[in-house]
Amino acid sequence: MKIPKLKSHSPVTHDNTEKDLIIVPPSVLDDKLRDFEEHQKMRNKLLGDVALAVALIIPVLTATFSDYPYVAGATLRGVFLAGFIFVLVRIAYGGYKLYHADGHARVDLVESLQEDSREVKKKE
């Protein structure tokens, strides 16, 4: 796929602007950004799971579960503990996926786009 030259004249370089331009096909950019977005979603989801785990364990540690009609207090405590254990498993799985995912930091994204741009320029 041949990428057309940029239609603007030479870009104006400011004090903090790099002179390199990143030129990649839209499909490559879409793939890189999709991976970056998925990585950010995993990180945010993990923090929400930690907050949920704390919210589930605090009543187990501090509250006295009274018996209600048709529901025993031990059953309520068991539901909270089961939810806490389930959330701990989700945290462990999410941490495993996040740890073994490719580097998707902003710097890694820019570097990979620059490498792809160099490959496209070589093909021209």
Image (cartoon, grey):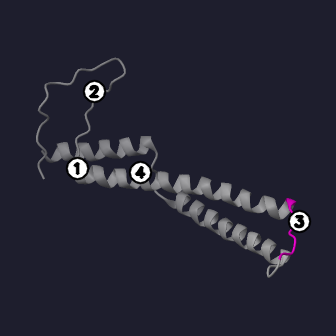
User: What percent of the width, then of the height, locates residue 10?
Assistant: 16, 24
- Residue identifier under label 2: 19
User: What percent of the width, then of the height, locates residue 68?
Assistant: 83, 75
Q: Amino acid at mark 1?
A: Pro
Q: Amino acid at mark 4?
A: Phe
User: What percent of the width, then of the height, locates residue 122?
Assistant: 18, 44
Is the Cβ of the residue at disc 4 closer than 8 Å to that at disc 2?
no
Mark identifier at residue 36: 4
Q: Amino acid at mark 3?
A: Thr
Going from the N terminus, do you reach mark 4 or mark 3 first? 4
Q: Nearer the viewer, residue 118 or 52?
A: 52
Is the Cβ of the residue at disc 4 closer than 8 Å to that at disc 1?
no
Of circles 4 and 3, which is in front?
3
Quick one: SS at disc 2? Answer: loop
Query: Callout 4: 10 Å neighbours few (<14), some, many (20+)?
Result: some
- Residue identifier under label 3: 64
Q: Nearer the viewer, residue 117 or 44?
A: 44
Quick one: SS at disc 3? Answer: loop
User: What percent of the width, then of the height, locates residue 70?
Assistant: 80, 82
Of circles 4 and 2, which is in front?
4
Decide: is 64 above or below 121: below
Q: Nearer the viewer, residue 30 or 60?
A: 60
Does 65 appear in magenta?
yes
- Span highlighted in magenta in the image: 62-68
- The Cα–Cα distance between marks 2 and 3, rounded to whole angstroms, is 65 Å
> Left or right of 2: which side holds 111?
right
- Residue identifier under label 1: 26
